[in-house]
Structures are given as structure tokens and as C-alpha cells.
Image (cartoon, helix red, strand yellow):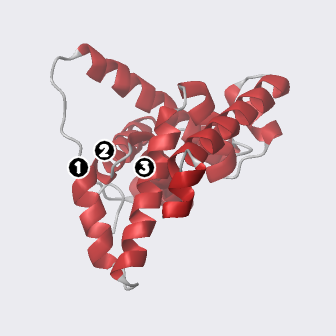
Amino acid sequence: MAIIPLLAGRRARQFEQQLRPHLPALYRYAFRLCGNRDDAEDLVQELLTRLFEKQPPLVHLDNPQAWLLTVLYRQYIDARRKSQRTPTDLNDAHSDEILDNLHQRRDTPDHALEQTRLQHDLQQAIDSLNEEQRLVVLLHDVEGFTLPQLQAVLDIPGGTLKSRLHRARARLREIFSSEREPSTPVERVNE
């Protein structure tokens, strides 16, 4: 399957060969940013369309995946700002996605439901972080970038990155401990 199905020829094949290894990471990252599959696919498709038009020389980059993820993030921010200026609000397809995931799983229904809830809770917790912390957590903890790589890609000092990562992780721990653990000893005993 071609990335851009209507385009043919050597240029399209070359473009596809350069980007195919990076597509899984782009889709994962887009999903983490958007929170649902349809918006993530639209975001990646828009990125691929723009890149195809410009044909940047990815082979000359030291870390093309980092560059692609940075461009994807900036495109996400631009789209988000644009949507905030428009009065219409798009419906979230998250509930459909949960049902799709349940039907695709072969585990027991209870396990599948728990996994879906955990994924949903994690996505909500990540979404509750401020933009700077979310970006660092997604790139470092989810995509596996090192702090020196992030420092080069984001053009942010290492100390600032460490601070944001520490605060983001602390916030995530705080969110999960308050959601998962009953607040009083009596509630814990009665469960």
C-alpha cells in the first residue's frame, strides 16, 4: 500500500522508502497527541502530504525520526490553535475506539476492559499535563528519545528538560495514586 496512493513514479517510491520506517512512531506519537485514531491518522496524512510537496532530504539528517516528530508536533499545535479559533467543536470518537479495542482483544472481557480503562486513564493523565511537560514525556518515555537528543531537537537546555520530565512524572504519579487508591483506610478495608 502506498503512503500517498494517487501518486506514482520514482519520486513517490523514493519518498515512501524514506518514510516507511518512521510511520509507526509517527502514528503512535500522533495518537498520544490527539487522543483518538481518526485525528491521529489525519494529522499524519497531512504531514505526509506536506512533506511530499516539499521533499526534504531526510537522508542528510542525523536523526530523521526526531525531526519528523518535531514537525508533527508543530503541525499539531498549529491545527489545535486553528481549531480553537473556530466556533465548531468536533465530536470525540474515543468511545468508538474503546469498543473497537474490546472486540479485537482475545483476552477475557474483564482483562480487556481493565486494559482499556488503564489506557484511557493514562491518556487522560497525559492530556492533563501542560503542553511542555506532555511533549517531553511523550518524546522521552513513550518514543524513547534521550535527553541529549531532546535537547538538540527542542532547543531547550538539559536542566529545563530534566525539570519538566521530573515534574511531569510526579504529576502522573499523583494522578494515578489519587485515582487508584481509596482516600481513607476504611474505604480500603471495605473493598
Q: Quadrant of the N terminus?
A: bottom left
Identify the residue at image location x=18%, y=39%: 91
Residue that extends furthest to the left in the rendered view of this protein: 88
Where is residue 48? Give x, y as percent.
40, 45
Give the secondary structure at mark 1. loop
User: Can the viewer see residue 156 in this picture?
Assistant: yes
The residue positioned 48% from the left and 33% from the top of the image is 128
Image marks 1 and 2: residues in contact by CB distance under 8 Å: yes
Residue depicted at 36% across the width and 41% down the height: 43
Helix, strand or loop under label 3 = helix
**Quick one: label 1 or label 2, which is nearer the N terminus?**
2
Residue flagged by tag 1: what amino acid is it?
Ala
Q: Marks 3 and 2, Cα distance to the nearest angstrom?
A: 8 Å
Disc with the residue nearer the chain's start (3 vs 2): 3
What amino acid is labelled 3 in the image?
A: Phe
Q: Earlier in the sequence, mark 1 or mark 3?
A: 3
| Residue designated by label 3 | 31
Say what amino acid the circle numbered 2 marks. Asp
User: Given this view, does label 1 or label 2 mark the residue nearer the observer?
Assistant: 1
Estimate the spatial distance between the alpha carbons at disc 1 and disc 2, rounded to whole Å.
9 Å
Q: Which residue is mark 2?
A: 39
The tag on residue 26 is: none
Label 1 crowd bin: few (<14), some (14–19), many (20+), radius 10 Å: few
Query: In this image, 40 relative to 158: left or right?
Result: left
Judge from the rendering whether residue 174 lies leftward or rightward of residue 19; answer left or right. right
Specify few, some or many for label 3: CA neighbours under 10 Å numbering under 14, 14-19, or 20 or more: some
